[in-house]
Image: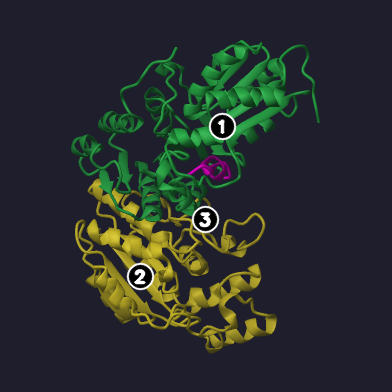
Chain colours: A green, B yellow
Amino acid sequence: MTMAFEKSMRQQFADTMLTVGQEDPRLIVLIGDISHFILQPFARACPGRFYNVGICEPTIVGMAAGLAKVGFYPVVHTIAPFIVERSFEQIKLDFCYQQLGGNLVTVGSAFDYANLGCTHHCYGDFALLKTLPHAQITYPASPVEFDALFRQAYTSGVLTLYRVPAHQHGQAFNAEDILLGKGIRVTEGRNLTIVATGPQLRNAMEAGEELKSHGWQAEVLYIHTIQPLDVELIRASVRKTRRALVVEEHMCNGGLGDDVLRATREIPRVQHASLSIPNTFVTGYGTYQDHCETLGLTREGIVRQVRSAFGSPKGEVVWQR
Amino acid sequence: MNKDLRKKIVQMVYNGRDGHIPSAFSIIDILDMLYESYLAHDPKNPSWSQRDYFILSKGHGCVALYVVLQKYGFLAETELEGFCRKGGILGEHPDYTKVPGVEASTGSLGHGLSFAVGVALGLRIRNMANKVYVLVGDGECHEGTVWEAAHVANNLQLGSLCVIVDRNGSAAQLMPRDDLPAKWRAFGWETIVVDGHSAAELRAAFERVNFELRGTPTAIVANTVKGKGVPMLEGHGIWHHRIPSSEEHKLIMEALS
């Protein structure tokens, strides 16, 4: 079932900070001069625990690790590339190497800042953070998911990335069904597994419906936690369908597609395909939707990819080298 | 000038076949005085909540920190013998998860001050008056993050923060058009310049720091000599990361006798 959400992801972030911050005096929020106004209710309710530190992201991340050392649960919030890419060494050394827990809440997922160009895009963040021990990666694409995942992870003692997209997938999940590290089987299928993450779940669901008329019964898996990945869910589905298509707004290199390949390598005669961002910069302009269409990250693109990669669903899977 | 600690540094590097002797020699007098007279610490309980924090941001000077931690009871003599050896806890950069008394894992330059800003801020939020000392190198002050953190610390008025700059000339040999004390003053820090090998000047400087919970942070720019105490090690030549031969080891130990 799909439904429209009125609340934006960023508003949910602010609301979660407010409620958790009032419950837990160890929560502290550091921002790099974005979301300043939307976080004012938190700042007022939790005096002394909100800092707009300005444009110095590596130092914000280092500061946050220092706060973690003395017992706080820090949240660092700004645009994705400036945390994950610019401040990667601070994430790696100040948090992960020192085994300190913290929370990175990024906005500007993938190419959300469509017209701002490559300086403000970030579609290699899964790959980067997957190289770090003591880190976990979440990608909540509905407000209920952000709230649930944050509450489960923020005191976990490891570094957690929350990749917050501007767009939502539109599925109505119950909070109790959102479990850190566990994927969700959204639809049951027989001869095709579509593994979707982020807002692309919407397209995956629509494509699954359309593919029925071509004989496909798609099992759609939704992954909101990239690391640790629910490999058992993926293996169980692929063992049944023997065909896996991964749909993600991330670079092909180091994305969820790689993880699905690794997770299913022991299963014989599986066909794999991926819809992701090729190993190139997204240099065009336009809207988020324009970029999705260019990259094939659409309902039509998924249908096309299934048909070209897997051919016909009739009969047995023909495994090709 | 502490000759005994210098001898221990040389012996560790000689035995471990790794380490930075001159970088340790330039800071050893500062660290010894800090632990002797100004840093609240409890070697039996390194995570004592009332302790002061010392963060060695120029992690490659860690052999100086190790011998001081051993002198003040955090480490056993046998731990020093395991320096850079398989199974030992002491490496060429300090690891906070392994070494009692080490507050931060450092080595990549430009991290320690930002981390310390977070520590000082967190302590102040809890209204705790623990002092936070950070030692940075003058070469490390080429890192932009040092100045990001300096800017933030002044704006947050983190008066419990005291930076010690080991001005041993590493920076000036590369970028001579520099005035470090003027820079720290320009960033709004109370700035004191001392001879980093003079006990009297160091003592006077440490006693001048106000450590107000909400006040101006302090930078002590300590003019030091890389390799101080052994003429053949002094300066910026080959000894930065050189391991003494048995003959050189003998000569160095004689110079420290």
Determine whether A46 is above or below B90 in the image: above
Query: Do the CB atoms of the residues marked 3 and 2 lie less than 8 Å apart?
Result: no
Query: Residue at 46% of width from left, 38% of height from top?
Result: A160
Per the rendered image, the range of residues in magenta is A122-131
**Amino acid found under the numbered disc labelled 3:** Asp
Is residue A302 highlighted in magenta?
no
Q: Chain of mark 3?
A: B
> Which residue corresponds to mark 2?
B164
**Amino acid found under the numbered disc labelled 1:** Gly
- Residue A227 shows up from this direction: no
Q: Quadrant of residue B11?
A: bottom right
> Which residue corresponds to mark 3?
B95
Q: Secondary structure at mark 3?
A: loop
C-alpha gap between disc 3 and disc 2 = 21 Å
Determine whether B82 is above or below A12 in the image: below
Residue B95 in the image: x percent, y percent?
Answer: 52, 55
Residue B41 in the image: x percent, y percent?
Answer: 36, 58
Q: Chain of mark 1?
A: A
Quadrant in which the N terminus of chain A appears = top left
C-alpha gap between disc 1 and disc 3 = 47 Å
**Amino acid found under the numbered disc labelled 2:** Ile
> Which residue corresponds to mark 1?
A296
- Residue A29 shows up from this direction: yes
C-alpha gap between disc 1 and disc 2 = 56 Å
Q: Secondary structure at mark 2?
A: strand
Q: Is residue B148 left or right of residue A135?
A: left
Residue B96 in the image: x percent, y percent?
Answer: 48, 53
Camera-side residue of A236 and A97: A236
Q: Is residue B115 left or right of residue A306?
A: left
